[in-house]
Image (cartoon, rainbow, N blue to C red):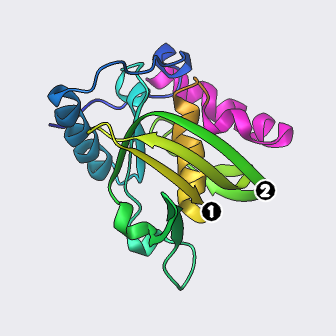
């Protein structure tokens, strides 16, 4: 079932999300609907606040053709090196992230900020502790697009949008477009 993606200006996008205390079959249905919605919108990540739920839940699916390099990206997952492709789709709750490394620019967009893209500086790598819907925990150490996507989607759980992370000059440039976007929702 396709869900409504909340747009810039909706207060739900600015609220901090609550951790999930219980994992049940309803979450599996929600995850399936979130993935279907994300695919239909041609995105690679979607956080629960973007569909109006302030819970700490995220879905990510990075297609092979979106990977940044000619060789497949890899990540260290629970101590083993694995292709990122093998992790997809990634569905998790209550993430704990530790970004690290140099700040790297990358042009980001967002399903909740339609039609706007801008350069964002984020740490190059991230260590993540992600609880899956079956209760198992993935410990991931990664770089590349997965590190970027994890940071972007988990920002949503704290009430942040990528537009909060752009340079001061970019904020000035985007201000009119963002105001128009908020008015049109």
Q: Is residue 110 visible?
A: no
Residue 178 position, x and y percent, is 62, 31
Considering only order in the chain, which callout, 1 or 2, is on the residue closer to the N terminus?
A: 2
Marks 2 & 1, CB-CB < 8 Å contact: yes
Secondary structure of the residue carrying numbered label 2:
strand
Secondary structure of the residue carrying numbered label 1:
loop
Check the image and report above or below for 90 versus 174: below
Tell me if 109 is positioned left or right of 5 in this view: right
Mark count: 2
- Real-space CA distance between mark 2 and mark 1, rounded to the nearest whole angstrom: 9 Å
Q: Residue at x 68, y 58 (%)?
A: 106
Q: Residue at x 61, y 28 (%)?
A: 160
Would residue 11 be counted in the magenta stretch?
no
Residue placed furthest toward the right: 169
Check the image and report above or below for 151 versus 83: above
Which residue is disc 1 drawn over?
143
- In depth, the one of 80 and 144 nearer the eye is 80
Residue 147 is drawn in which quadrant? bottom right
Q: Residue at x 71, y 31 (%)?
A: 175
Tell me if 36 is positioned left or right of 38 in this view: left
Label 2 CA crowd tier, 10 Å (few <14, some 14–19, many 20+): few
What label sits on residue 44 in the rendered view? none
- In depth, the one of 53 and 168 nearer the eye is 53
Q: Which residues are magenta?
A: 161-185
Q: Quadrant of the C terminus?
A: top left
Which residue is disc 2 drawn over?
101
Q: Is residue 151 visible?
A: yes
Would residue 172 be counted in the magenta stretch?
yes
């Amino acid at each position: 079932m396709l869900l409504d993606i909340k747009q810039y200006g909706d207060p739900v996008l600015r609220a901090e999300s609550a951790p999930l205390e219980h994992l049940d079959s309803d979450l599996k249905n929600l995850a399936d609907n979130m993935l279907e919605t994300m695919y239909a919108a041609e995105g690679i990540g979607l956080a629960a606040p973007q569909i109006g739920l302030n819970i700490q839940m995220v879905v990510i699916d990075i297609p092979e053709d979106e990977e940044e390099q000619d060789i497949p990206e890899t990540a260290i997952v629970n101590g083993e090196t694995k292709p990122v492709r093998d992790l997809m789709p990634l569905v998790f709750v209550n993430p704990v992230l530790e970004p690290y490394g140099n700040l790297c620019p990358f042009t980001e967009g967002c399903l909740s900020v339609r039609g706007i893209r801008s350069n964002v500086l984020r740490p190059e790598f991230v260590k993540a502790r992600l609880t899956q819907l079956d209760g198992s925990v993935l410990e991931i150490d990664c770089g590349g697009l997965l590190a970027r996507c994890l940071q972007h989607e988990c920002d949503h759980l704290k009430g942040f949008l990528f537009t909060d992370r752009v340079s001061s000059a970019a904020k000035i440039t985007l201000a009119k477009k963002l105001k128009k976007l908020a008015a049109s929702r």
